[in-house]
Amino acid sequence: MLRIFKSLTYSIIGLMSLGWLSIIFITSMFVGPKDNWLLDFFANNLIIDEVIEKYGQDFSSLAEGLYILMGTMNIFLLVTAIIFSLAWSGLSHLLNIDSPGKAKIYSIHWLIYTGITLAIFVAIIFYFTKSTQYNAAQFLSNGGITIILFSQTIYYFLIYYIAVIVGTARFARSSVLFANKLPGNFL
Amino acid sequence: MKNFIIGIGGTGAKCLEHLLYCCSSGLGPEQLWAGMVDQDEANGNISRTKILLSKYINIRSSLREEGKSDLTSDSDLFRTLVTSNSDSVWQPLRGGDPTLEEVIKYELLKPEVKGLVDCLYGPEEKKLNLSKGFRARPNIGAAAMLATTSNVDDPFWSQIYKAIDLARGGEEVKIFIFSSIFGGTGAAGFPNIARKIRAIQRERQVTSNLYIGGALMLPYFIYDIPDENMEGELFAKPAEFLDQTKGALHYYSKLFEYDKIFDQVYVTGWDPLSELSTFQPGGNLQNNPPLFSELYAALGALRFFSKDNAIGENQEIFQIGKNETNEILWSDIPNVSNNLNSKENLAKLIRFAFSYYWMYAPALLGNWSKIKKYSNENWFKRLIYKYTYNDDNKQCEIGHEYNQEIVSSMNEFCLDILEWITDMHYSTVHNTDQKMNLILCDFFSEYKAKNAQNRVTIKEKLNAAEKKQFNGLITDGGNFKLLNVMSNLCYKKIKKDQKGLGVFMDILFRSCEQ
């Protein structure tokens, strides 16, 4: 049990290595739009100007909704990354790796698990950017959605992956891609 | 402190066998010299222990080689430094096919002494070929042993002289003797060898620091004697065991009353007697199984050697027995001392043998091209690769001859452990109402009581379902899985100064502790 707690601690440290950026981002989204590079980036890359004009809106009134959409979506993505990485780190101690050579078998399990995690990330992003739940979503351009999809998926996958690499039980490291490259006595 | 152990006769050798396994589990003292006494040197029991003794000595020395493979003194695995003579067995009577007549030089005796000898020994006893031991005739054995000289040049006795000299030099010396009371060699040797040691002690004017202990085995097994070809043969008859024991105990009680030969005597027996399915009067075919009561004798010896054992002025006699039910349980095994838990260490040794033999040795045996597939696994990286890596040629040398010898000799030793515990498990209770409840072994072994040379067959490979039964291997209600062993292997702290394969062996052994 102690080893599981240790693994969870390492996993949390792994989550924090990149996760702090996400927290700052989420906080700034809920604080609201400010005239800075981020607002410019949203305006220039994510929004379709023609639609704004068509509906007779200006960007400043739309930005608030977009910030809330982005903030909420990032909370969901972060929570998913946390849950899935901690769950793997804990459960890796219970995988039945009882003899040499068996850890590799569980790489299939890890791949499936990671695939599911990625799919959930994509589903969350699609839900927020494609559904009518958030008004701001209809003003997102296809290019903007693609940017959000790729950047957010890669970013949260990295958070998850780092947390999993450092949190996986030592004997199960061969089942996680590149985790076996860590030194034997590391963590 | 110097410790000496002497196993007399077949039973003595078998007790020594148990003691060696206990020593490999860390229950033994720091150092121990071991020797055996038997006229029947070819006896199967003797040869089995002789082989085990040399295996123990070899594997221990290869795992305690400073700078190469070193378990270090901190490790419990093979903790005891066991030494022995190049020939660990002392034959009281040398020469081919000696008889009592020849030993006592009967023809040269005066007529009146001849008459006395004739009163004590029948014609067939005088002419009995003693090359296969004293055949349950302690009267012959006693005469033969007393007729031999305890010469300082004899490798066996030179060790005793050395022990006594050490005691004279102020070092504490403990000598322990294993023997049965109902056989020939053992019953004859038990008091006589101890008396000889005391005589040497007196001769060398050593008055302190020398302690003698003994484990006396009362009848604990019987066997059926085949009807054919046994007429006229002299051999140990189970029907005479109790009478012989009664006579011997009477004699010992008188002896101990007037002369303090032993400081501590540990007495054990077994009721109901274990039934052996095979019988051989002697020779290499006599290969009796290890039995539970012999483990008591071994633990008695270890208690005697323990630093906690305060030996008093008066002779002490200890008895031990199991609980009154028909079940033999872990709780029936006494601890060696307050700090040494016999059950814990033996259970650890059995789990170690299991996991090494079926899980880890197959991965470590062979050349590098076969082994390297495990090189990315944490246990391998941490405990094998790092410690068998040669910086000069930038190679992991686990596949090299030196390391492979250690891996395969440990594999052989683990097989011996599994055979020993399994054989004891089955044979102690075979054909009786008793039930052995120490380990679960039917899933990895097969028992053929009638096949004396190969009573127990250990499976070469186990399937997944059989491996899963590891958690019930030690029947103590615990749930210790192979997964726990693997996990421990990857997390247990490596002790300082450990080297080479010593690192892996020690961690695997410690990983088997629940």
Image (tube, rainbow, N blue to C red):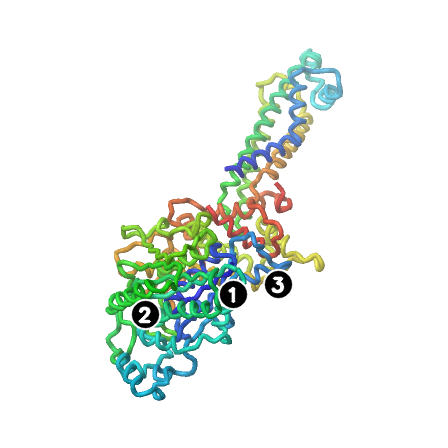
What is the C-alpha distance between the residues marked 2 and 1?
27 Å
Mark 2 belongs to which subunit? B
Q: Residue at x 58, y 22 (%)?
A: A131
Which badge, 2 or 1, is on the more N-terminal residue?
Answer: 1
Q: Report the front residue among B206 and B9.
A: B206
Q: Which numbered mark, 3 or 2, is in the foreground of this view? A: 2
- Compared across the picture, whether B330 is left or right of A134 comes to left
Q: Secondary structure at mark 2?
A: loop
Q: Amino acid at mark 1?
A: Thr
Q: Which residue is mark 1?
A: B83
Q: Which residue is mark 2?
A: B183
Q: Residue at x 49, y 45 (%)?
A: B484
Which badge, 1 or 3, is on the more N-terminal residue?
Answer: 1
Q: Amino acid at mark 3?
A: His
Is residue B415 visible in the rendered image? The answer is no
Name the image quarter holding residue A129: top right
- Compared across the picture, whether A113 is left or right of A68 comes to left
Q: How many marks?
A: 3
Q: Secondary structure at mark 3?
A: loop
Q: Amino acid at mark 2?
A: Gly
Q: Decide: marks 2, 1 in contact (CB < 8 A)? A: no
What is the C-alpha distance between the residues marked 3 and 2?
48 Å
Is residue A138 visible in the rendered image? The answer is yes
* Image position of B398 with respect to B332: above or below: below
Residue B224 numbered mark, or none: none
Q: Which residue is mark 3?
A: B400
Instruction: Same chain for labels 1 and 3? Say yes or no.
Output: yes
